[in-house]
Image (tube, helix red, strand yellow):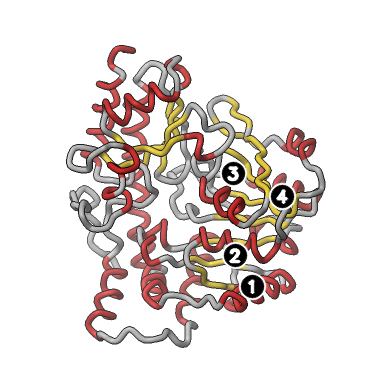
Amino acid sequence: MTHPTPDFDEDIDRIGTHSVKWDKMEALYGVPPSEGLAMWVADMDFRPPACVQAAVQKMADHGVYGYYGDDTAYRDAIRWWMQERHGWAVERDWIFTTHGLVNGTAMCVEAFTRPGDGVVLMTPVYHAFARVIKAAGRDVVECPLALRDGQYRMDFDAWDAQMTGAERMLILCSPHNPGGRVWTREELEGVAAFAKRHDLILVSDEIHHDLVMPGHSHTPMALIDNVADRLVMMTATTKTFNIAGCHSGNVIIADDALRGQFAAKMAALGISPNSLGLFMAEAAYSPEGAQWVDALVDYLDGNRRLFDAGVNAIPGLASMDMQATYLAWVDFSGTGMTREEFTARVEQGAKIAANHGPTFGTGGESFLRFNFATPRARVEQAVARLQEAFGDLQ
């Protein structure tokens, strides 16, 4: 069944709706929402597919918001999606539902490590990982990615030399945020071997796995050999379908022993899911949801090409060639400017709020991250503003 093509060009006013992305940017970046462009927080300025809206409307029409029971259909929707879209067979009892994947990450840190243990991150990487690791009293072990020919590469020889034996866990971001890399099967095999060499629990955050640009293909870590005994997979509908506010994510564990440890921690903390998130996820993981995602990725790819062409035309700026996500990672080192100077030009000159590179860890110092999951007219506006703000470099 064919559904109407979504209108991603629709300009939806999010100001004053408790949107952290729009309503907090003036306090954090000095960029007023009335004249600025919010390109920082990783949510989209699009409505989710009609099937998700219908599920929420059905709840509202019923009008009773009680405890959720019998999640079989929800679990089966996840299983269908992973098999259909990613070629990965998941069993019902492997699935745990957390309050999003930052919560899922924190739960993994609590379940599989102890205070003082080292948790390995391949930096620069999603900033919430380091935040929850530090908050839990564990040590962040930064293993910098190698930047070669404008792309990030694994550097296992260097990382092997860094390990001390105090490390207990490795968190992989796949596809990679903020670099937009889709790791190859060979690279993922290298990650599995590295985790095995150093006896690390491997947590693979694959929240961006549905947002892969044409010409690239994501391989779930679960499809790599000889890693199941140490692997924890994390996936979610939230990034794919722009429903992050429902705070729903899945930790999926095939290994019985690891699953038992995680279940014990969930029980100890009394965590149970939000019914709104379950209804939305079940609706999203459907043929209609799949058709919407295909249209979304096509639209995002157009935005990506527009943004990259415009930014890369500015001398000294380089937008990394991204293969997944909707987050552009722009290097300003070629301008010769200090971080304060190029950031001021973006925020005060172009009036764009973008994520600061150093928050992603070692290797992010000369970068800003821009979210282009917004109507194309706004991306065109962002490019024009950046070209004007750095116009003296032309």
Tell me if label 4 and label 1 are in contact, CB under 8 Å: no
The label nearer to you, 3 versus 2, is 2
Q: According to the image, label 1 marks what residue?
A: 265
Q: Is residue 274 left or right of residue 106?
A: left
**Looking at numbered disc 1 in the image, what kind of residue is underneath it?**
Lys
**CA gap, disc 3 and disc 1:** 31 Å
Of marks 4 and 2, which one's residue comes earlier in the chain?
2
Q: Amino acid at mark 3?
A: Trp
Q: Earlier in the sequence, mark 2 or mark 1?
A: 2
* Rendered location of residue 7, percent (x, y): 21, 53
Q: Is residue 132 left or right of residue 382?
A: right
Of the image marks 3 and 2, the number of the one nearer the N terminus:
2
Nearer the observer, 13 or 315: 13
Q: Amino acid at mark 2?
A: Met
186 sits left or right of 385 in the view: right
Q: Residue at x 53, y 27 (%)?
A: 150
Query: How many angstroms separate mark 4 from mark 2 (CA)?
Result: 16 Å
CA gap between label 2 and label 1 equals 7 Å
Q: Looking at the image, is 165 positioned above or below residue 288?
A: above
Position of the N terminus, as image quadrant, is: bottom left
For the residue carrying disc 1, how many other residues have a C-alpha within 10 Å: few (<14), some (14-19), or many (20+)?
A: some
For the point 20% across and 54% down, the residue is 16
Q: Gap between marks 3 and 2, in whole Å?
A: 25 Å
Q: What x and y, as percent, mark residue 189? A: 71, 48
Q: Along the polypeptide, which appears first: circle 4 or circle 1?
A: 4
When asked about the image quadrant of residue 379, the answer is top left
Marker disc for residue 183:
3
| Element carrying mark 3 | loop
Q: Describe the element under mark 4 as helix, strand or loop.
A: strand
- Against 275, residue 49 (above or below) is above
Q: CA distance from mark 4 to mark 1?
A: 19 Å
> Pointers 2 and 1 in contact (CB under 8 A)?
yes
